[in-house]
Each structure stands twice: as structure tokens, then as C-alpha cells.
Image: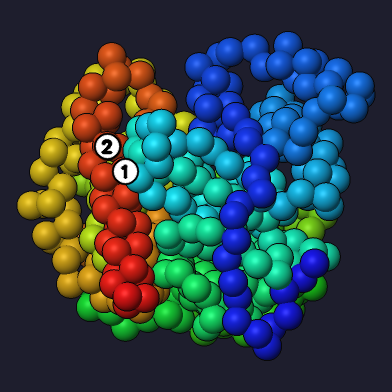
Amino acid sequence: MQHPVSVPIGVTVPNYADRIGFAQLTRQAFEGVDLQPLRDQLVTRITEGAAHAGEGLDLSLIVQLLGDKAAGLAIQSEVLTFHQLFRTPAAAPKPGLRVLALAADIDMGGNTPIEFLLEGSDFELLTLYVTKDVGLPETLPDHDVAIVVASDSEECREPLALIEKAAQRWPRPLLNRPDLIGNLDRDKLYRLLAGIPGLEIPSTIHATRAQLTDLAQGRIACEDIAGELRFPMIARPRGTHAGVGLAKLDDAPALAAYLAEREEQDFFVARFVDYASPDGLYRKYRLAMVDGKPYACHMAIADRWDIWYLNAYMAFSEEKRAEEAVFMLDFDHAFAARHKTALDEMSRRVGLDYFIVDCAENQDRGLLVFEADNTAVVHNMDSPVVFPYKPPQMRKIFAAFTAMLSRHAGEGKASAA
């Protein structure tokens, strides 16, 4: 039953369903484990009526990991109609802290992968799925600290709104407040960060297919869409992630060819910033902002501007990995120190307790921000043999994240006393 907005929220003994969870299943898929036998086993249990809700949610994730996103989401939505709360047990027999994650009914990349961040800790994770049809329960499961893990995507708007209505009466500390998550939208973030000294973020403009068609055919100019816009420009369909539909368009004919290959009606466009280093290579960084402090997650190096870690092929270049290792080792005294003013002000304006930034350095060595979100994957799955410098850095991030949760939980207990 959805919680009435006008009364205080209480807590009760959790009625959870255990599950294997995101981190373990994703790690198995990453390491090449065949998940098909487990999928078949879970399907059999469901067919026989012997499965519990946690197994249904695990099946949903496995099906998505096997490549059938639509079927996986259908299973997840069906499970969430009768059960909302799931537990990922702590590594220790007795949990040191109980964390409540507030998630949305979305694909496996749409909520913060918090299980990775809690890896190896003695924290017990309860995940409560807030859906537009069911909303929040009348009484919340007992917890020490809560964090919103739903993303800024359009599919999460209604769950975030439901959480926001209850946020002022939340009985425990609540991190990553839902009203702030929406500021991470591509077409909002650049306005939020505008004017920060030493930080560049191009305006991301919503443009319709009709507008871009007129531009491609010469009926309007770039400035008729936005004053800052010009060729070359970056375009992507609105609502896409992970480089889907992303393209650099040098002129009107390139824009026309791009539109001919796409069916979407709405796009984001922005001016292209050439951030190539003097050696001609592009370097893109992922940072985790934890409790206001930046941490290095990875550094991708490639000879192409549309770079992310996988297409940089870091595992195949000892030279690239050596540079990434130095980036991580010297981060606090080099990159973070160089951009301290910009990073501090960005963190203050965003206001979230935890978020991820994908960025680079422009040719003036200023901080060039591409995007920020609260759901990018920060993990410790890479081979310690190939990437020996990564496990210590990931553990450093995880320790900062759990320390942040502990601090807020402690402050909540102190204020309650």
C-alpha cells in the first residue's frame, strides 16, 4: 500500500527476500561464467511455483546479462507487483550497518550499482523498489541510513517524485536527495555548472528532428537553435547512454546523413571540443565524488574522441596502463590539486553525497566536463594481474563510500538521542 504523504513514516522489521544480487551475477558474467544453467534452474523453480521473489529478481538480471533486456524487465516488473524489498547479505555474519537503497523499476544500469561499493564490508544492503503503481510502503524497513539510487532518467521521474514527497519526514539520514538527482540531466547540468572558474562544459541543447532537418537543409543556422551551437557538433538521441547514436558532425551534409540513419524525433546537440593532448591522443577520466572529495576511477587513452574505457583497449597496452597507474598514484597531488577549485565548486553546486563525473582536460588544461550521473559502474572486477594498481584504488573508493554512510548513520543516531 502506498504511504500517505501527510503522516510521519515509521519503521518496522524488514520483510525482505534474499537474492544473489547485482555484484555477484555481474562479476560472473564479466569473468565469462555461463549463466544459462542458473537461468534454466530459476525458470524451472518459477514454473513449479517453488521460487521466491529474490530468485525472480535474480532471473530478471540474468536474462538482461544474457542480452534480452525486454524480457528481463518484464520479469522484474512482474516480481515487483507483489514484492518490493530485497536483501543482499553482508559479508560478515553480523551486519555492522543496515543500508536502505531506494531504487526504481528500470534496467540493470538505471540504479546506482551500490553492491559493488559495499563489497567486502560488513554492511547489509536492503533495496526497496519504489514504483509509480505501488509507491512507498506505509512503514519502511528498519535501517541506519538510506540512499536514493534511482537515476535522473525519465523512467525514474515518478519514483523520485514519490520519494521526494516523503523525504522531509524520513526517519533516518537520507543521502542523494531525489530533488538534486534531476540536476544531472544533460540539458540541466551545464546550466548548473556555468561560470565555474577553470571548468568548461558545453551547452547541451535539446533539438527536434524538424529543427535539425531545417539546419541540414540550410533553412536555419546553428545559432537559431542555440547561440553557442556551431559545426562541428556532437549529436545523440535524447535518452540514450553508453555512446548509442553518438556522432561528431562536421557540417550540414554530415548532419543530413546522420538523420537519414536515425528514427528518433528528439536529440541532444552540443559544440565539439577538441581535447586531444599534444601527442594526438585523447584522455578521458572517470572520477567518483564521495562526500565532496574526488577519487580516480579510471583513465582511458585512445586515438579517438568518442572514447570510453572498453574501446580504449587499455588491457592490450602496457604503456597506457603505466600512465593510468601514475594517474591514480599521483591523483591527489596532481589532477585533483590542479582542478581543486573547479571540483570543489562542482561538488557544492551538484549537492549530492555521491556521484560520478566523466571528464577530460581541454587544451588550456582546464577541466572539461562531459557528464555526471549517480549510476555509473565503479567496480573491482578487472584482473589484478593485468591491472595491479586498480584494486588498491577501488578499495580506497569503497572505504570512502562506507565511511560516508557510517558518518551519516552516526549523526542520525546522535540527533535522535
Q: Is residue 153 left or right of residue 300?
A: right
Distance, label 1 to label 2, CA atoms, is 5 Å
Q: Residue at x 60, y 81 (%)?
A: 8
Q: Quadrant of the C terminus?
A: bottom left
Query: In this figure, which residue is indicated by the disc labeled 1?
Result: 398
The kind of residue on which mark 2 rests is Arg
Query: In this figure, which residue is indicated by the disc labeled 2?
Result: 395
Q: Are marks 1 and 2 in contact (CB under 8 Å)?
A: yes
Q: Residue at x 65, y 67 (%)?
A: 139
Q: Which element carries disc 2, helix, strand or loop?
A: helix
Q: Is residue 162 visible?
A: yes
Percent x, y for residue 206?
64, 73
* Residue count near mark 2 (Cα–Cα under 10 Å), binned few <14, some 14–19, many ≥20: some
Q: Quadrant of residue 169?
A: bottom right
* Up-down relation of residue 353 to residue 220 (above or below): above
Q: Is residue 196 left or right of residue 304?
A: left
